[in-house]
């Protein structure tokens, strides 16, 4: 094995990706703090606004496998810089919108495609290129970037939207996206080989895998076609569908308006959602550490089962003020928020091999966002029909418990990298 430098550039690359994903998480979190201001400003219904959010969540996932293929074909930097430019343009144009379809087209379609072109396939691509050892830990750290961004940006964006209007929040998102473009160009290298190095932990005889010459769209579709007959692929799709439904679609989108329904001030509710991000950072990094050492199927079982139990309790502890029981939920749920990602990514390597693991994960992640999109829109309909979100939380909890059983059925062969 090559002698590991005291500081391998792989860690610098991971740091750049962490900062980029952290900023992207702020962009992704913005719709949750805009629901109430848009209701007040335009008089649009919550279901109408949530429909735009659901389109954003859906495209965030459906774009991922094609983005992974594009990164493999044309390089990570080009795809990410293009995605950031798309996000900035979409967010900037929203300040002039006047009709619901403008929100759907800009925040739903344009920003959804832009954020989806990065998503977590960005983290998976960089981890696969730059690391041989400690890959699970790195994926956990990079996944935690989304929680860190949520922690940093949500309270500030909520304050901006409440005190100065939602357009200020949109301008901040646009500016942040445009600022990140030159930073990616200057500081993110394409691969270790581009600077004459091997990945962190690589053996002396390690050879860089050849880049795919297949058309990116064809590679994404071909990988899906080959994965579809495999039972494990369907188990991963189903479990991650439930993951998206119970996180970004339900809690990520509707925790703030649900808390507001109970009399909680919007900024306080946004701070609670951000606090979930604090514990998410800890939980996800620890999950990455465990993924290198523990059967990832067992990890997923505990994550889904415990998340389901916490969602059963949420409707009974969401009050107008922050009680100890509310904080217990925030801590518990935060530790579990995206802890599912590192073991899921590692399990994806067993479907079509490590060479196409990122594209496979892109499709699995697409299922995550389909679940999130359904929950984002359906939860709003439940709120309109019954006057609160309780039924949405209970349904999500049941599905998490069911998913905890099925993840244990994923193939018994070795799944570690």
Image (cartoon, rainbow, N blue to C red):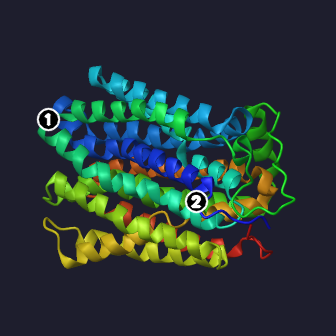
Residue 172, percent across and down? 29, 34
At x 71%, y 41%, the residue is 194
Residue 274, percent across and down? 30, 58
* Residue closer to the observer: 50 or 273: 273
- Vertical side of 51 occupied by 197: above or below: below
- Left or right, 15 with respect to 262, comes to right
Q: Secondary structure at mark 2?
A: helix
- Which image quadrant for residue 56? top left
Q: Is residue 105 visible?
A: yes
Q: Which residue is mark 2?
A: 240
At x 41%, y 65%, the residue is 280
Q: Nearer the viewer, mark 2 or mark 1?
A: 1
At x 45%, y 55%, the residue is 145
Residue 10: assigned label: none
Q: Quadrant of the C terminus?
A: bottom right
Q: Which residue is mark 1?
A: 164
Q: Is residue 109 visible?
A: no
- Vertical side of 224 occupied by 137: above or below: below
């Amino acid at each position: 094995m090559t002698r590991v430098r005291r500081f391998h550039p792989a860690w610098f690359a991971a740091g750049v990706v962490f900062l980029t994903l952290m900023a992207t998480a702020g962009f992704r979190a913005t719709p949750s703090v805009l629901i109430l201001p848009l209701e007040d400003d335009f008089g649009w219904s919550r279901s109408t606004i949530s429909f735009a959010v659901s389109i954003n969540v859906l495209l965030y996932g459906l774009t991922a496998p094609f983005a992974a293929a594009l990164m493999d074909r044309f390089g990570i930097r080009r795809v990410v810089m293009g995605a950031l430019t798309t996000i900035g343009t979409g967010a900037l144009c929203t300040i002039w919108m006047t009709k619901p379809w403008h929100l759907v087209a800009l925040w739903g379609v344009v920003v959804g495609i832009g954020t989806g072109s990065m998503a977590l396939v960005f983290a998976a691509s960089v981890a696969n290129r730059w690391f041989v050892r400690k890959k699970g830990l790195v994926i956990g750290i990079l996944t935690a970037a989304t929680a860190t961004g949520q922690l940093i940006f949500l309270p500030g964006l909520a304050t901006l939207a409440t005190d100065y209007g939602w357009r200020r929040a949109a301008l901040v998102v646009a500016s942040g996206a445009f600022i990140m473009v030159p930073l990616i160009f200057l500081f993110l290298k394409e691969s270790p080989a581009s600077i004459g190095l091997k990945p962190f932990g690589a053996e002396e005889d390690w050879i860089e895998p050849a880049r795919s010459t297949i058309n990116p769209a064809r590679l994404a579709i071909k990988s899906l076609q080959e994965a579809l007959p495999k039972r494990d692929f369907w188990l991963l799709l189903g479990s991650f569908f439930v993951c998206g439904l119970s996180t970004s679609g339900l809690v990520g989108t509707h925790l703030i308006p649900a808390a507001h329904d109970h009399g909680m001030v919007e900024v306080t509710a946004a701070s609670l959602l951000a606090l979930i991000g604090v514990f998410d950072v800890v939980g996800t990094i620890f999950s990455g550490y465990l993924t290198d050492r523990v059967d990832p199927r067992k990890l997923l079982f505990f994550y889904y089962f415990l998340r389901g139990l916490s969602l059963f309790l949420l409707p009974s502890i969401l009050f107008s003020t922050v009680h100890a029981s509310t904080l217990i939920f925030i801590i518990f749920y935060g530790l579990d928020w995206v802890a599912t990602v590192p073991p899921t990514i590692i399990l994806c390597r067993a479907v079509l091999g490590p060479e196409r693991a990122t594209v496979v994960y892109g499709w699995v992640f697409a299922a995550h966002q389909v679940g999130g999109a359904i929950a984002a829109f359906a939860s709003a309909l439940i709120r309109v029909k019954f006057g609160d979100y309780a039924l949405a939380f209970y349904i999500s909890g049941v599905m998490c418990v069911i998913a905890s059983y099925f993840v244990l059925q994923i193939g018994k062969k070795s799944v570690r990298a």
